[in-house]
Amino acid sequence: MTNLVTTVAETVESNSDSPAIVYDGSELTYEQFWTRAGQFAQALENNGIGEDDRVGIYLPNLPQFVTAFYGTLRAGGIVVPMNPQYKAREIGHLLGDSGAKAVVSLADNVPNVRDVLDDTDVEQVISVGGDAEGATAFEDFLADETKAIVDRADDDVAVQPYTSGTTGTPKGVLLTHNNIRWTTEANADVPHGGFQATDRLVGTLPLFHIYGMSVVMNGAMYSGGAYYPIPEWDAPTVMDLIEEEDLSIMFGVPAMFNDMINQPDAAEYDLEALRFVNSGGASLPHEVLERFEELYGVELYEGYGLTETSPVTHANHEGARRKGSIGTPLDGPGDTSVEAKVVDDDFETVPRVEEGPIDEEEADLHEITGELVISGPNVMQGYYELPEANEDAFTEEDGTTWFHTGDICYWDEDDFFFVVDREKHMIVTGGYNVYPREVEELLFEHEAVADAAVVGVPDKRRGETVKALVVPTPDADATPEDLKQYCLESLAEYKHPREVEFVDELPRTTTGKVQKFKIRDEE
């Protein structure tokens, strides 16, 4: 069996007295954390929740997230992580689609859960951070005894995160125990010498997102290192913590590193304890990379991955690094590895350039770029109950199944890959994915909106930000500020348009499709 939980159980045995989770001045040893995970697993069973049942975790980065995650897997269940910024409208789909039977929620968010209960299969609501009507407090939910690990097969589903497609409808991604275990082990080997039990990992990446969950949290628990969960990003707070606690490994998104280097006293921080720093989730601006390395004397590596690939597929390594590249395909345990290539519209392999990065303004990108496709033990089983989406997502060729990433790349003869664009209209803001259709559909529900289009526009801090162009109805009395607030009430903060512009009409093709490239070109 390659159940990640079994692997972590072995880590607990050899690191029982070492700190596993350090939060707000207190710590849980591996033995204490493992006991609590077992108590959570037993509590699920006591409430009729077991093998293949879904459990939603609707929390920021807190020790209870780690406990609930491993407790659910230990009980043979499937974790459905949910963004704690989501409102009732958003979690309603995730809970309803997944069929989750239990939800672990921040107490302040329990009203959102209550609002959608009638449309879901949820039977048990567990609150963290206080009492909440209709919920059982986390500490009261834990059983007195612990449950043994339920054996699961390699291809049994372990985690079902949600990602949006080009239509904006969130899709459940089926990640197996082998997917998660393989990625955790492979990524833990990326830093020189691999993750160590002496490492202290910065927990800034949100745990509801596969990047923070699989790479950082699971990496820490797998290696015996200490995980420092941070519920909310604040650059000075995190930098102080790194300095005071000698944190050694940090994974982040470009916006985080941009915030760090732009602090007024950025040069006064001593972050020499950091031995490995990695950026993912969006393209890393060259200026941010150079300034970070200049200030702190530590190399900032770039990698790549998607929710559907658990997530890491490419990484730069010490001695094998190209600035501006997402790196080379990831090697894993034994002889296993990620396979990747760049293909054209006919699924023919696109020729490699001699050595990247190239001057993209001088090159004929049409001749050397194509879509990045991935195959390997980290690739998802498929989208949950969406056969048509699965048919579009995969291509079979000579006995190999390839996943379509939708990202446009070129590659060189040394197997370094370079992302140049996105095939889809997805907006990446601060490392989060925003799909315009979801925002557009909400805007169309407003009585003052006759037509709308949402695009990503350049933003110095976030990489991109969300902008909505709205054609108002003739008798509309709403303002752009009104529409921004309207979206904020129903969507996570990072999804709502930070700019709303009223226009007379949207550029469209003869078949009625909005020409979003024209809108972006005007920005």
Image (cartoon, rainbow, N blue to C red):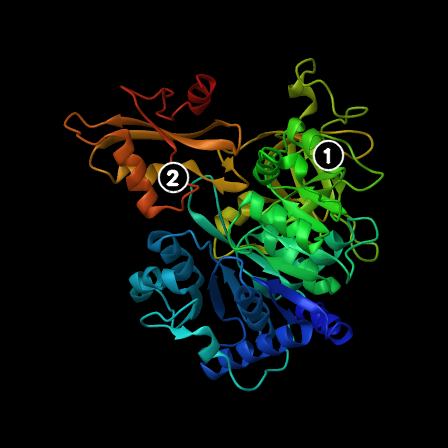
Toward the viewer: 183 or 43? 43
Residue 102: name its quadrant: bottom left
Q: Nearer the viewer, residue 168 or 236?
A: 236
Asked if 225 appears above or below 36 in the picture, the reply is above
**Which residue is at a point 71% across and 53% down the rendered structure image?**
246
The C terminus - image quarter: top left
Q: Residue 330 location in percent, x, y?
A: 75, 46
- Horizontally, residue 49 falls left or right of residue 112, namely right
Quick one: 53 or 72, which is closer to the camera? 72
Dot 2 surroundings within 10 Å: few (below 14), some, or many (20 or more)? many
Label number found at residue 267: none
Residue at the spot of label 1: 293
Residue most extreme to the bottom: 145
The foreground one among 198 and 395 is 198
Q: Position of residue 506 (x, y in %)?
A: 33, 22
Work out whether mark 1 precedes mark 2 in sequence or the reverse, and give the earlier one: 1
The residue indicated by pointer 2 is: 496
> Does 21 appear above or below 485?
below
The amino acid beneath tag 2 is His
* Identity of the residue drawn at 27% across and 19% down: 504
Q: Residue furthest top?
A: 362
Q: The N terminus appears in which quarter of the rendering?
A: bottom right
Q: Amino acid at mark 1?
A: Glu
| Label 1 SS | helix
Can residue 307 be seen from the camera position used here?
A: yes
> In the rendered structure, are the residues bearing label 1 and label 2 in contact, judged by CB atoms less than 8 Å apart?
no
Left or right for 485, reference 497? left
**What is the x, y in percent for residue 147?**
59, 82
At 32% across and 62% down in the image, what residue appears?
Answer: 111
Distance in Å between CA atoms under marks 1 and 2:
33 Å
In the picture shown, does residue 387 fall above or below 278? below
Crowding around mark 1 (Cα neighbors within 10 Å: few <14, some 14 to 19, many 20+) is few
